[in-house]
Image: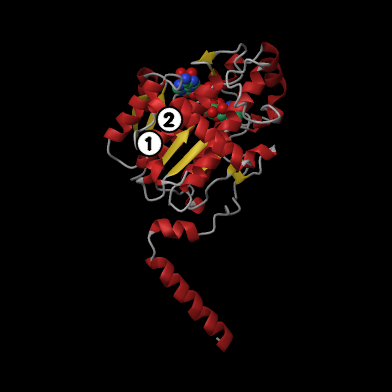
Amino acid sequence: MNEMNRRTFVQQAGLLSVLACLPGSVLAQIISKTPPNSPFGADSTAEQVTAGLDLSGKTYAITGANSGLGYETMRVLAMRGAHVIGIARTMEKAQEACASVAGQCTPASLDLADFESVVNCAGMIRSMDIPLDGLVCNAGIMALPERELVNGVEKQFVVNHLGHFILINQLMATVMAAPQGRFVILSSRAHRAAPEDGIQFDDLGFARDYAAWTAYGHSKLANALCSLELARRLSGTSTTSNSVHPGVINTNLGRHMPWYLHVAQTLFGWAFMKSVEEGAATQAYVATSPGLVGVNGYYFADCNPNPGETPQMQDEAMARRLWQVSEELTRDYLPAAPAGAAIPA
Ligand SMILES: NC(=O)c1ccc[n+]([C@@H]2O[C@H](COP(=O)([O-])OP(=O)(O)OC[C@H]3O[C@@H](n4cnc5c(N)ncnc54)[C@H](OP(=O)(O)O)[C@@H]3O)[C@@H](O)[C@H]2O)c1
């Protein structure tokens, strides 16, 4: 080893020993937040992206765990040894789903359009008194053919975003209590169908120009922006938030689609659609990959970071405003002193 190499070696060893002495939260700030290149892609499955992982001792909560991607994510995480809290719209559905997978699953229920039930579900999870290593906000509805309102707000925005916004805030301290808790929020490439100027703060009831796909895209843009702002609030902690596009998969999500889209899907879906096993891969990867420690504020598709289809996906000002407006809309259901209050707003 020449003098130059020796000096570099000593400097690096010194730096490593200093880093090793730092608390996890400080380390999280220092560790590079750029996601590593993933060996996985569009045709990877949830089983493949978690192969070799031992998740025993970890606990994840997943909404929409009785169907489609949520069910497959629960199945695979439980198979890897995790304790999974499988949340469905009713306790019966949650129990049935949990009973049908191998491993440790605890059923829980909420209706994301009924905020009181979201608060109760979070309370039940908190009462278990175990940190959550991950909260996967997966449940959703798509493309309601007619405009539906919940307390004056468009229903997809309520179910896909506001209900999860309450759950996130109610479980903030529980996720932050884990050594490296992760929020994983299901967005969609359909965010590109959102209105051109993004979140319709002046018309969250979509009184103007309701269109099924526009309103769905609007709610999925809200999911991604919620994750972006949450990530900003979490920076400097060991907890992270990332959003996910799972791909296009034939699940119950399509129940409101017109018949001709079902026909088109049946005829041509093979060319662009993923299986449920592949569709669950990105969220399973983002929730569990040891390579993603400290990776915060990204949008992932096909198990890799993705810039998103529109510049709004990176619009921090819109994300911040969405958070504030969501707080105003859900104020009565948020914890009195949210753990997030410790995080700069
Ligand atoms: N499939 C795709 O191509 C695709 C593409 C992009 C993004 N995504 C996103 O991926 C996520 C999962 O979708 P999926 O394809 O797995 O759909 P899915 O099979 O229809 O599952 C959706 C889950 O959400 C639950 N849910 C619906 N409304 C709810 C409410 N008000 N309260 C509580 N739970 C409710 C459903 O419960 P019930 O069974 O009781 O209705 C179901 O468990 C969604 O967020 C979706 O937007 C999917």
Q: Name which residue lies at 61% across and 11% down.
A: 146
**69 sits left or right of 128 in the view:** right
Q: Secondary structure at mark 1?
A: loop
Q: Amino acid at mark 2?
A: Ile
- From this viewpoint, is residue 214 visible? yes
Q: Is residue 182 above or below residue 151?
A: below
Q: Which residue is mark 1?
A: 171
**251 sits left or right of 335 in the view:** right
Q: Which residue is mark 2?
A: 166
Quote the CA–CA distance across marks 1 and 2.
9 Å
Q: Nearer the viewer, residue 173 or 270?
A: 173
Q: Secondary structure at mark 2?
A: helix
Quarter-of-image position of residue 253: top right
Q: Name which residue lies at 51% across and 51% down.
A: 292
Q: How many residues crowd mark 2 within 10 Å: few (<14), some (14–19), many (20+)?
A: many
Percent position of residue 131, x then y: 33, 42
Q: Is residue 129 above or below residue 179?
A: above
Q: Nearer the viewer, residue 33 or 6?
A: 33
Percent position of residue 335, x then y: 35, 33
Q: Nearer the viewer, residue 279 or 181?
A: 181
Colour mapping used in the image = secondary structure
Quarter-of-image position of residue 87: top left
